Image (cartoon, rainbow, N blue to C red):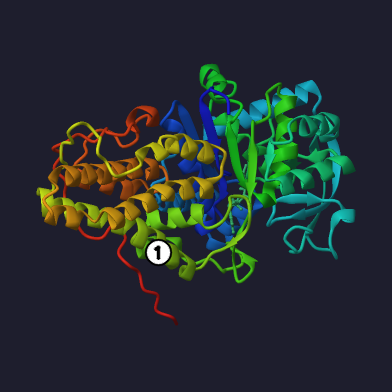
């Protein structure tokens, strides 16, 4: 990853309905990346809402509301959910905002001028659910080949984007940068599409009006062409060069695998047509499933994410989403699995370690972190083993190997728990071995301070609570290289005892 400022994006979500846990998933992942990147430099995290297109217009019509009023109402649900998950986005772009629409029109005009956008006639099928044009030959039994829904026939004079012109450059780019699309399965699929050959595609809708107007008239700009541009409109393309140069090309663009074609074929081609670079990495992750099926708005198989947060706590859900499966693959989502992670990893391993350490500190030292003389010698904890832990955790996170990162953090959790079991502070206390007990209690508390810092990107709220109870006041999100030096916990700090960090949850089977 380059040393330029870090820029991470999520897809912008259609607000034809309320959000579900799948939308929270991508956004939580982006949040963890942004929080981690900020501990070592400038970072910008963009998310937002895709508010144009037929799908949103239909939802508004069904509700009997004007599309803009519908979007203004719905966007609040999305913002509420992301607030519950403590998503630390730097900007939320809405495609109906003038700052975005201006950029879409400017792009359209520039490409019309350069010849990459030209006039033609479109005749073919359109899938409203996927907002996608399909050639007759691509349909599967007369239905949309992606989602299986019915399609409608369109025949209109449209504007086209000269995608075919970029076929060779895309092939070269894929070959020269085999890591630019991850995971490998998606990279291979996209490469196969490029090898089949690309066709120009329509980027306007003549007989439709919920979108950015085509400059000079002739309907509106196709919703996907409009939506992709959010990634550059929000950071100042064509109006704030300094910000744009600081953040573009994006470091990581996160998406679900179903929209990989738009992001890894169409998007770089549009960027090149504008004279800009392709993003450094597009990561197309897998799907959360339930009963083997993708969780989705229209399938009606998604549970209410607000209720899930009430039930488990946002941080337990965040932990589950990152820990459960290697990032990239599909995984099944169920309350049983979340409860299992919550009770076991968080309650038994981390929560217990925290609780019993502070309980012993209160019992033997009135809750005050002991001073250790001579500094940190005579310690029973092999802290040297963990000297490279922060570097490993950060490298894994920035390489999007979240499960590896959490497993590495758990090595410290396990080692601290084992130290308590082996060194038996209660025996040291009974035998009046005060120096050894001081050294041991200090190491345990220092280990907890490390855990709070390392876990703050994944579990910001519980990490803050650990911080507060450890009696710490400086920033939990300081630069890791400075903050994670063993011995940083000031002696004489007054800690605070409290309830379980992760109270057990019981599932009542229905
Ligand atoms: O596609 N598992 O918006 P969208 C994992 N507006 N991730 C899931 C998921 C699941 N079951 N369900 C949804 C759009 N997602 C366009 C994008 S970008 C220029 C325009 C996540 O509301 C995942 O990130 O259908 C997926 O790609 C996205 O939500 C789709 O959101």
The picture places residue 338, in percent across and down from the top left corner, at 45, 64
Q: Is residue 357 above or below residue 271?
A: below
The picture places residue 372, in percent across and down from the top left corner, at 18, 36
Q: Residue at x 53, y 21 (%)?
A: 246
Q: Nearer the viewer, residue 295 or 207?
A: 295
Q: Residue at x 84, y 58 (%)?
A: 139
Q: Quadrant of residue 503?
A: bottom left
**Residue closest to the far top:** 242
Q: Nearer the viewer, residue 128 or 208?
A: 128
Q: Is 309 positioned to the left or the right of 222 in the image?
A: left
Q: Is residue 497 visible?
A: no
Q: Is residue 213 above or below residue 143?
A: above
- For mark 1, does the 10 Å Cα neighbourhood hold few (<14), some (14 to 19), or many (20 or more) residues? some
Q: Which residue is mark 1?
A: 344
The quadrant of the picture occupied by the C terminus is bottom left
Q: Is residue 259 visible?
A: yes
Q: Is 191 positioned to the left or the right of 390 in the image?
A: right
The picture places residue 451, in percent across and down from the top left corner, at 35, 44
């Amino acid at each position: 990853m380059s040393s330029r400022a870090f820029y991470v994006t999520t897809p912008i979500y259609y607000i034809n309905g309320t959000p579900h846990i799948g939308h929270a998933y991508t956004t939580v992942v982006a949040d963890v990346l942004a929080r981690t990147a900020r501990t070592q430099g400038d970072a910008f995290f963009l998310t937002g809402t895709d508010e144009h297109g037929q799908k949103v217009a239909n939802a508004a019509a069904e509700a009997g509301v004007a599309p803009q009023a519908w979007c203004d109402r719905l966007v609040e649900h999305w913002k509420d959910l992301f607030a519950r998950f403590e998503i630390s986005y730097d900007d939320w772009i809405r495609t109906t905002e003038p700052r975005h629409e201006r950029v879409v029109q400017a792009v359209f005009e520039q490409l019309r001028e350069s010849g990459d956008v030209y006039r033609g006639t479109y005749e073919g099928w359109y899938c409203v659910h996927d907002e996608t044009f399909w050639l007759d030959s691509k349909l599967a039994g007369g239905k949309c080949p992606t989602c299986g829904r019915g399609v409608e026939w369109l025949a209109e004079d449209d504007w086209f984007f000269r995608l075919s012109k970029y076929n060779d450059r895309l092939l070269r780019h894929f070959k020269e940068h085999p890591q630019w699309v991850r995971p490998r399965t998606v990279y291979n699929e996209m490469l196969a599409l490029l090898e089949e050959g690309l066709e120009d595609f329509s980027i306007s809708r003549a007989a439709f009006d919920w979108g950015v107007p085509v400059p000079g008239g002739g309907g509106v700009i196709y919703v996907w062409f409009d939506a992709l541009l959010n990634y550059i409109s929000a950071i100042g393309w064509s109006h704030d060069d300094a910000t744009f140069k600081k953040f573009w090309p994006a470091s990581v663009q996160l998406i679900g695998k179903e929209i990989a074609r738009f992001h890894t074929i169409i998007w770089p081609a549009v960027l090149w047509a504008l004279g800009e670079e392709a993003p450094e990495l597009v990561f197309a992750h897998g799907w959360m499933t339930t009963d083997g099926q993708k969780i989705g708005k229209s399938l009606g198989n998604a549970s209410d994410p607000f209720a899930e947060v009430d039930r488990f706590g946002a941080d337990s859900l965040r932990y589950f989403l990152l820990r459960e499966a290697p990032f990239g693959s599909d995984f099944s989502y169920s309350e049983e699995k979340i409860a299992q992670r919550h009770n076991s990893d968080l309650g038994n391993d981390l929560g217990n370690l925290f609780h019993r350490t502070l309980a012993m500190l209160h019992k033997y030292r009135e809750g005050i972190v002991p001073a250790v003389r001579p500094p940190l010698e005579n310690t029973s904890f092999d802290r040297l083993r963990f000297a490279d832990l922060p570097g490993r955790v950060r490298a894994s996170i920035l390489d999007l190997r979240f499960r590896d990162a959490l497993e590495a953090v758990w090595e410290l959790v396990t080692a601290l728990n084992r130290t308590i079991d082996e060194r038996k502070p209660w025996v040291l206390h009974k035998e009046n071995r005060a120096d050894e007990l001081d050294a041991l209690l200090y190491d345990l508390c220092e280990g907890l301070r490390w855990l709070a810092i390392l876990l703050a990107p994944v579990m910001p709220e519980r990490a803050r609570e650990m911080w507060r109870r450890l009696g710490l006041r400086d920033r939990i999100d300081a630069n890791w290289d400075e903050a994670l030096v063993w011995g940083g916990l000031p002696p004489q700090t007054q800690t605070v005892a409290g309830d379980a960090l992760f109270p057990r949850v019981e599932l009542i089977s229905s």
